[in-house]
Amino acid sequence: MYSKTFVMSSNLLLIGMPGGSEWILIVLAVLILFGGRKIPEFMRGLGKGIREFNDAKDNVKKEIESGMTDKEVNRASTTQTSNTTQP
């Protein structure tokens, strides 16, 4: 009745987020693997990475917006010059 892709995608949706006991196991594994002293360093590096990514994203967004406004200004100036040159 259902297509094969629908059944596969619905099975993937059942995987979902880990529950409470799974989170406890994940935290314990991280503590065992990295130790208590390395975790703050790791989180600091992760925070820096996220901050740099957001800064780069904002810069790209500003460049795109400024390009759009420059394009609109150029269009307006070319239409004004073409209107003044015509009799």
Image (spheres, rainbow, N blue to C red):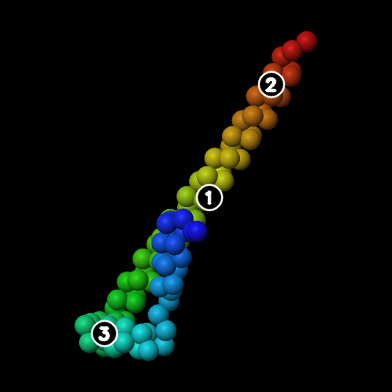
Question: Which quadrant of the structure image shows residue 5?
Answer: bottom left
Q: Is residue 33 above or below residue 61?
A: below
Query: Badge 2, how many Cα within 10 Å: few under 14, some, many 20+?
Result: few
| Residue at image point 31% right, 83% down | 26
Q: Which mark is residue 1?
A: none
Along the line of sight, the residue nearer the viewer: 51 or 11: 11
Q: Which residue is mark 2?
A: 81
x and y percent of residue 54 in the render? 45, 61
Along the line of sight, the residue nearer the viewer: 11 or 86: 11
Residue 35 appears in view: no
In space, the residues marked 2 and 3 are separated at their CA atoms by 69 Å
Q: Which mark is residue 29?
A: 3
x and y percent of residue 23 in the render? 37, 85
Question: Which quadrant of the structure image shows residue 25?
Answer: bottom left
Q: Earlier in the sequence, mark 2 or mark 1?
A: 1
What residue type is disc 1 on? Lys
Q: Is residue 81 above or below residue 11?
A: above
In space, the residues marked 2 and 1 are separated at their CA atoms by 28 Å
- Label pair 2/3, CB-CB below 8 angstroms: no
| Residue at image point 65% right, 24% down | 78
